[in-house]
Image: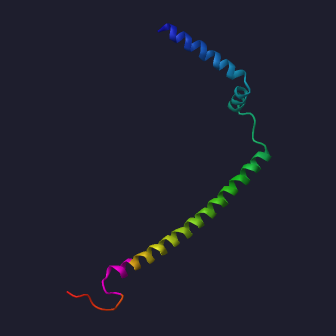
């Protein structure tokens, strides 16, 4: 049991050390320290991207609304056709015989 624990500590410690000296580790450390505030250019790009996503969502909502209207119309037409074919003699105008 102690052997496995020692191996985990050795490899885990080595991995943490390599992460700490890597550029990713430095970026994480800078972020934790509160450094590296977003530049104005980055903020402007994010706001533009956010606005583009909102506009695209508005277009998609409008398209879905139109599709719902078309589906409702199609369902009404199909229901009317079923009513006409369900009644025998409805096309000739005669009453069904009992």
- For this orientation, the residue located farthest to the top is 3
Q: Left or right: 2 with respect to 89?
A: right
Picture coordinates of residue 45, whole percent (x, y): 75, 50
Query: Is residue 4 shown left or right of residue 54?
Result: left
82 w.r.t. 20: above or below: below
Determine the image quadrant of residue 27: top right
Horizontally, residue 22 falls left or right of residue 89, namely right
The residue lying at 56 percent from left, 11 percent from top is 7
State the residue at coordinates (65%, 58%): 54
Residue appearing at x 43%, y 75% in the figure: 78
Residue 65 in the image, given as x and y percentages of width and height: 55, 68
Q: Which residues are magenta?
A: 82-90
- Residue 40, given in percent of the width and then of the height, sits at 79, 46
Residue 93 highlighted magenta (yes or no): no
Q: Compared to 75, does 18 lie above or below?
A: above
> Residue at point 70% right, 26% down?
25
Instruction: Count numbered badges in the picture.
Output: 0
């Amino acid at each position: 049991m102690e052997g496995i624990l020692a191996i985990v500590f050795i490899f885990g410690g080595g991995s943490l050390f390599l992460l700490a000296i890597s550029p990713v580790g430095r970026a994480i450390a800078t972020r934790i320290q509160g450094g590296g505030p977003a530049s104005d250019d980055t903020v402007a790009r994010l706001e533009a991207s956010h606005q583009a996503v909102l506009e695209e969502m508005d277009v998609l909502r409008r398209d879905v609304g139109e599709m719902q209207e078309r589906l409702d119309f199609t369902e009404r037409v199909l229901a009317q056709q079923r009513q006409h074919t369900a009644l025998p003699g409805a096309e000739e105008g005669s009453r069904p015989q009992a």
